[in-house]
Every structure is written in structure tokens, then in C-alpha cells.
Amino acid sequence: MNSESKLSQLANSSFTMDDFAKALEVHDYQFQKGQVVSGKVFQLDPDGAYVDIGGKSSAFLPRDEASLTAVTDLSQVLSLHEELEFLIIREQDAEGQVTLSRKQLEIRQIWERLVEMHEGGQTVQVRVTGVNKGGVTVDLLSLRGFIPRSHLAERDHLEMLKGQSLTVSFLEINPDTKKLILSQRLATRSSSFSLLELNQLVEGKITGIKPFGVFVDLDGLSALLHIKQVSQKFIDSLEKVFQIGQTIKAVIIDLDEGKGRVALSTRILENFPGEILENFDEVMASAEARANRASNKSAE
């Protein structure tokens, strides 16, 4: 086939206006709710902006969807002809126009960022915005979160927390259901754990005495001194040895942040079996030197 025949064939197979319109409809079919698209703002109106996203009809960005913050003048948050990303929040209407949002895109990105922080075990700062029977509501990067009363350091006077900033960890996060549950207690525990290490001598107050051991408060972190770790000598009753509120020094022998477990020992401070029972004050007074000696022995 010669070149003239080829040109004639191409001319005969050229797109008609109907074909062109159909092709555009096929092209527009990809614009679906929840899709992120790129586009350029070409017109600003008092109630919104018109955006070219490559469809047969311009897309519309309502003023209330332009930013996370309240907007009165769109030119403060949008520049003409600047390439930006948008989220489609409403599919094509009868004229083929889709509705866009920058606000919802920012919110989606914040959720993604928080999920990453949760997976990385990070803590975050939040501001208390409200109080109810179950706990407090908080603002986290413009999202609404909740801290249950049981996960607050201050559980009795919640009204005092309004307006305060708190350091929290994530308890539960679900972008699909917009669920954001946080914990101040977990963040405090995590912070306290970072200061602890094995064979470290610590000081705390006894908060509970059970048949199996003694609970010791270490700056908000609960540790356990098991009955078998109190002395090298058998003890039949811990209540004969300790009192609630008593200050005690002990050595950390086990740490498990995942389970929130800190195990203590005073038996390794003893020079002979039963010394902690007979000369408690003397063992406590020289606890640092005794702990160093025990650590050196275990390293040999």
C-alpha cells in the first residue's frame, strides 16, 4: 500500500465528535470517590474553587473542603495554576463534575501518620478538649481522640485537665471507624521503663503486700519483689517483714516492657542468709556497695 492510500485510510478512520465524547467518558470513568488526583486550580470563587484534573468537565472544591482550618479567603490556602493533590469525595454529577477535598486528604494523611507512630511505639502530645463520665476527649493533630479514665494519671478531678497538654501512647487506632483511643498511663510506664536496666539498684515505696510478694512503686511504675527474692532464708510471712508505705532499695533482676513487668531482688544484697530480716536498715544503708559487688560477681 502506497503512502497516499495510507493517508486516505487514516482520514476515513478519523474520530468523529461522537467518538471523541465517548473517549472522554471512558477517560472520566476512572474518577471515583476516594481516589487521589492531581490538578491545578484555575478559578477562585467565594464558595469554592474550580480545578482542572484532566476530565471533560472541571472539578469543584467547596470552600469548607479547602483546608483543615476554617477558610474565609481561598487565596490564602490555594494558589492559581499550582499542581496540588485532591481527594475525590463525590463522583460525577449530571454535568460530569466531581467534588474534591483538600481537607479530607489531609485527614487521611494524618491517620496514616498516626498508624505509623502507633506501630513504632511512639508517644504523642495531645490537648484535653472535653470531659465526660468515662474519661476525657482530646485533640491530636485536629483529630478527636479519647482517653479512658482508667488510663489517666489523674482520675478524680478530670475538670482540672481541660486545656492541658498530656503525653500519651496509643491504645487503639482504626482509621476506617475513626476510632482513636489513647493512654497516659502507658506513656508514663514506657517513659519509666526507658530509665531502667538490669542489675540497677532502685528505690521505691511498698504499695501492696501479698502472700507471694511485695509490690513496689518506682516513680509510677509497679515492680514486684517476689517472696523468694527477699532473702536467702525462708520467709513464712511478708507482713512480719514489711509495711505499706515503707521505703525499700532493691536490684532489678528482670525487665519486660511488653508485659509491663519489673522483678526485684533484695536477697542478692545479703552477706549471709537472713541478713535482710535481722539488719534491714544496715542492708539498706550500704545497698549501693552491695549491689555493685553483686553485679561484679555476676560479671565474672
Image (tube, rainbow, N blue to C red):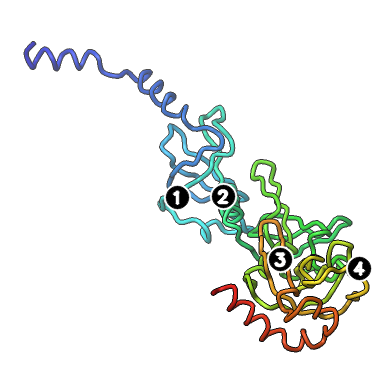
Q: Amino acid at mark 4?
A: Ser
As measured in the structure, the alpha-carbon distance from the residue carrying label 2 to the one carrying label 1 is: 19 Å
Residue at horizontal 64 percent and vertical 63 percent from the top: 124
Q: Is residue 262 above or below residue 293?
A: above
Q: Is residue 84 above or below residue 53?
A: below
- Sooner in the amino-acid sequence: mark 4 or mark 1: 1
As measured in the structure, the alpha-carbon distance from the residue carrying label 2 to the one carrying label 3 is: 25 Å
Identify the mark at residue 84; answer none if there is no mark: 1
Q: Which residue is mark 4?
A: 237
When asked about the image quadrant of residue 56, the answer is top left
Q: Which residue is mark 3?
A: 189
- Sooner in the amino-acid sequence: mark 2 or mark 1: 1
Q: Nearer the viewer, residue 300 or 138?
A: 300
- Sooner in the amino-acid sequence: mark 2 or mark 3: 2
Q: Select label 3 or label 1 by which is in front.
A: 3
Q: Counting other residues with Cα less than 10 Å from the Cα at mark 4, is it few (<14), some (14-19), or many (20 or more)?
A: some
- Sooner in the amino-acid sequence: mark 3 or mark 1: 1
- Determine whether the residue tagged by mark 1 lies in a helix, strand or loop: strand
Q: Select label 2 or label 1 by which is in front.
A: 2
When asked about the image quadrant of residue 132, the answer is bottom right
- The answer to whether 253 appears left or right of 208 in the picture is left
Residue 178 image point, x, y percent = 69, 46
Q: Which residue is mark 2?
A: 112
- Determine whether the residue tagged by mark 4 lies in a helix, strand or loop: loop
Q: Counting other residues with Cα less than 10 Å from the Cα at mark 2, is it few (<14), some (14-19), or many (20 or more)?
A: few
